[in-house]
Image: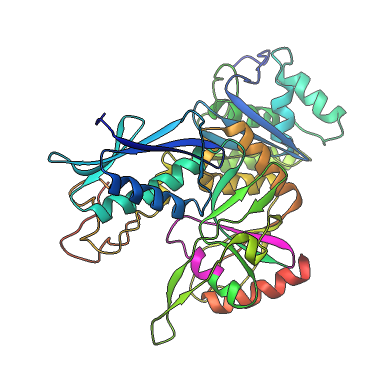
Amino acid sequence: MAASTYGQNFISFGIALRFESRNARLLQKAIATADRVLVGNLNPTRKRPEHTFVFGRDKERGFFVEHNDELATCGEIERGVFKYFDSYLRVRIGEFCPNRVFVHSGVVGINGKALLIPGNSFSGKSTLVLELVKLGGEYFSDEFAILDDNGSVHPYARPINMRTDDGKYRPYTVDVGKPEESGRRKLPVGAVLFTNYKENARFRPQILSPAEGIMTITPFTLPIRVNPAYTIRVLQQVMDSALIIRSKRTHAPRFAQILLQYLCKVL
Amino acid sequence: MSELQTPKARKRGLVVQEMPGEILVYDTETNKAHCLNDSAAFVWTSCNGVNTVSDIVREFEANAKGTVTQDFVWLAIDQLSSKGLLETKIEPKFKGKSRRDVLKTIGLVSVAALPIIASLAAPQSALAATSCNCSRDSECNLVNQVCPTMMCANRGMTPAFTCTG
């Protein structure tokens, strides 16, 4: 492990972290990245760290990030390394958070309940989330559903910046503000939608049982291997009280309208 | 195949969540999730190392779950064994027969939902499901290395860059 001069301890989602570097600028960049990744949920602590990240640069590896004495990533381009760290930290927090279950999922609030849209990156969930927000849904996240023991979902509201194809390719930014300002709070999960795109697909909702819902969401659930008992308990809380639907979807703007009409009737 | 076998449900390394009409089992040794329907769940919970197949048939009918045959119970036991949910592996009962033929025979005689176990493997790498967030190949630190995400935005966009792994 590289000798380090600067370091700071933080707690985030119940996990004690430490960031270290011999370079003050790299350390500040790491902290700023982490603060953005963890949507401000990064607070100084004196707790002994469970995860230590070391940032540095050397001739052999270029810029590098070590996690608990093992190399996480390295490369010649600083920006690339920090972009990878962005993803890496999100996943590690999601895996090791002791009292929340992180699921790769879009989340939108509708009529006081949350709709979860589980899916991996590039599955189209951000596009669908955006269309639902345009129609009046409350933006919670386009990346993670953070579930607690009671089966409620907490916001992970990072700004999303997407290019919408309306012939002009202009960016659309969702302004998330601060949770306390926007009044965004945890919501009970009202519905879970498993979907993938098929051209001209019609909305034909197939209702799943709670066990089928847990099975289907497992591939998107970060801590399933690390803490399966707790994870399944939390997922059961969610699935027991939510409407679980599976359906193909067509073009996002059209599908969002149909879906919203359906959910407003059933939620 | 001995009809006096007394299969025993495995408990070690399993996270079991019972739900109305179903049981979800997560196997921490193989990182697979299994969903047992009502019939499969009943057979599994009846496999206590003491009950024979005939005993399980009797219990099934006594619990008003329908009229079934020994083949019905064996179908469940075969699936449970192949998925590692029994303490010891059992020799398959229906070796050499097509699944369609087996189900047809059992389905015609039994008045109960056929035992079904759906299974799914948990993904090996959570990082693989998350984009590495590269927007240009000049930003990507994974050129010439194995990309763990396989979701790099750059993939296929520039001839100089290839995401492999």
Quadrant of the rendered image containing residue B119: top right
Residues B150 and B134: in front is: B134
Q: What is the tally of numbered marks visible in this picture?
A: 0
In this picture, residue A101 sits left or right of residue B6? left
* Lateral position of residue A209 relative to residue A13, left or right: right
Q: Nearer the viewer, residue A35 or B123?
A: A35
Query: In the figure, A66 relative to B1: above or below?
Result: below
- Residue A196 pos. (x, y %): 51, 63
Name the image quarter holding the N terminus of chain B: top right
Which quadrant of the structure image shows residue B73? Answer: top right
Residue range corresponding to the magenta coloring: A111-129
Residues A162 and B63: in front is A162
Q: Where is residue A86 shown, x and y percent of the image? A: 38, 51
Query: Does residue B160 show up magenta in the picture?
Result: no
Can residue A59 be spotted in the picture?
Answer: yes
Where residue A204 appears, as percent x and y from the top left, is 64, 68
Is residue A265 toward the left or the right of residue A72 in the image? Answer: right
* Left or right: A120 as drawn, with respect to A64: right
In the image, what residue occupies the spot 65% across and 14% down?
Answer: B5
Q: Is residue B28 above or below residue A115?
A: above
Q: Quadrant of residue A61?
A: top left
Residue at the (67%, 37%) spot, across then down? A233
Q: Is residue A249 visible?
A: no
Measured from the top left, where is residue B26 in percent x and y?
Answer: 59, 32
Q: How is the image coloured?
A: rainbow
Give the residue furthest to the left.
A59
